[in-house]
Image (tube, grey):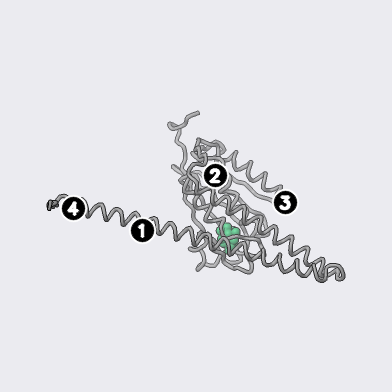
């Protein structure tokens, strides 16, 4: 028979190879489990409104023609739940989009005050509520991708709108290397013990309340990914019944780095 000689160098290489392979398989497994958990959560979230719509349809079928109160209640409930499903599927879609690497992503030097003015103006009309914008330098430039940044700010403003009923403020403050953008609401706030979890997918502080506001628990996890893409860091401070502030720290484009 032929003898295969395995010397020490080969053994070491083989060992390294098998270790690398193991690590790869573990990564893949973790990724799979993560995806599975995501799909399970998403299905669960979609199942609730479908169940509600189903039972109200049954009620309509039985009593809709004879009882006006049932008719009214059912129509409202079905339309609310349909809205909720629409929101949820939109969130799921944008979640899937953020996670795709082939999406066009092109960071450019942007005059952030002008961009924030546009975004807040647009949303003021949608919410029919005042969004105050303050800033200390109109010309400051940041390197961001406009589309994802727009999406990111909208997530924080949507939350400020949902979880408060007063004026929302957006403040821009220029530092030496960074720009700080704070989104401030004077709403229900987030309990201290929940703050560390709010960026987790599908996490909601108060499920019953969140159902009423039509939340999905996906917004902030999308925001975190969008922020990472743009090299933006996020801080939260909040006091129950006083309000919440999200602070975004964005790198400034220095004078000598300016393209235009
Ligand atoms: P949702 O779609 O439920 O709003 P998010 O991921 O955007 O999901 O937020 C997660 C949870 O964090 C929310 O359900 C809510 O409990 C809490 N939260 C987020 N923003 C605010 C805010 N501005 N004020 C109070 N609570 C907030």
Secondary structure under the numbered disc 4 in the rendered image? helix
**Residue 162 as seen in the image, left or right of residue 203:** right
- How far across and how far down the image is residue 67, in percent? 86, 71
In the rendered image, residue 212, in percent from the top left (x then y), is placed at 67, 65
Q: Name the residue under label 3.
A: 128
Disc 1 versus disc 2: nearer the observer: 1
Callout 3: CB less than 8 Å from ligand 1:
no
Mark 3 and mark 1: span between their CA atoms? 50 Å
Q: State the CA–CA distance, disc 1 to disc 2.
A: 31 Å
> 130 or 176, which is in the foreground?
130
Mark 4 → mark 2, Cα distance in angstroms: 46 Å
Q: Earlier in the sequence, mark 4 or mark 3?
A: 4
Disc on the earlier residue, 4 or 2: 4
Q: Quadrant of ligand 1?
A: bottom right
Sequence-earlier tag: 1 or 2: 1
| 181 versus 80 height, above or below | above
Label 1, residues with CA under 10 Å away: few <14, some 14-19, many ≥20: few
């Amino acid at each position: 028979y032929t003898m295969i000689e395995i010397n020490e160098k080969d053994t070491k290489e083989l060992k390294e190879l098998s270790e690398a392979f193991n690590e790869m398989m573990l990564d893949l497994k973790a990724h799979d489990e993560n995806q599975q958990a995501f799909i399970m959560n998403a299905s669960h979230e979609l199942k609730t409104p479908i169940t509600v719509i189903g039972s109200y349809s049954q009620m309509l079928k039985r009593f809709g023609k004879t009882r006006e109160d049932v008719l009214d209640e059912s129509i409202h409930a079905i339309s609310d739940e349909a809205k909720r499903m629409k929101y949820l599927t939109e969130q799921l879609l944008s979640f899937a989009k953020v996670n795709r690497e082939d999406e066009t992503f092109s960071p450019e030097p942007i005059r952030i005050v002008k961009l924030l003015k546009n975004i807040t103006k647009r949303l003021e009309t949608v919410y029919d509520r005042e969004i105050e914008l303050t800033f200390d330098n109109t010309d400051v430039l940041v390197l961001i991708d406009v589309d994802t940044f727009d999406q990111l700010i909208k997530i924080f403003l949507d939350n400020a709108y949902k979880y408060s009923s007063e004026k929302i403020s957006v403040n821009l403050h220029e530092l030496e290397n960074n720009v700080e953008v704070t989104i401030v609401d004077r709403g229900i706030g987030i309990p201290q013990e929940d703050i560390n979890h709010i960026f987790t997918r599908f996490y909601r502080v108060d499920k019953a309340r969140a159902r009423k506001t039509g939340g999905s628990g996906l917004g902030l996890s999308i925001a975190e990914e969008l922020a990472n893409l743009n090299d933006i860091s996020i801080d939260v401070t909040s006091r129950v019944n006083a309000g919440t502030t999200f602070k975004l720290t964005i790198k400034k484009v220095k004078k000598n780095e300016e393209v235009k």
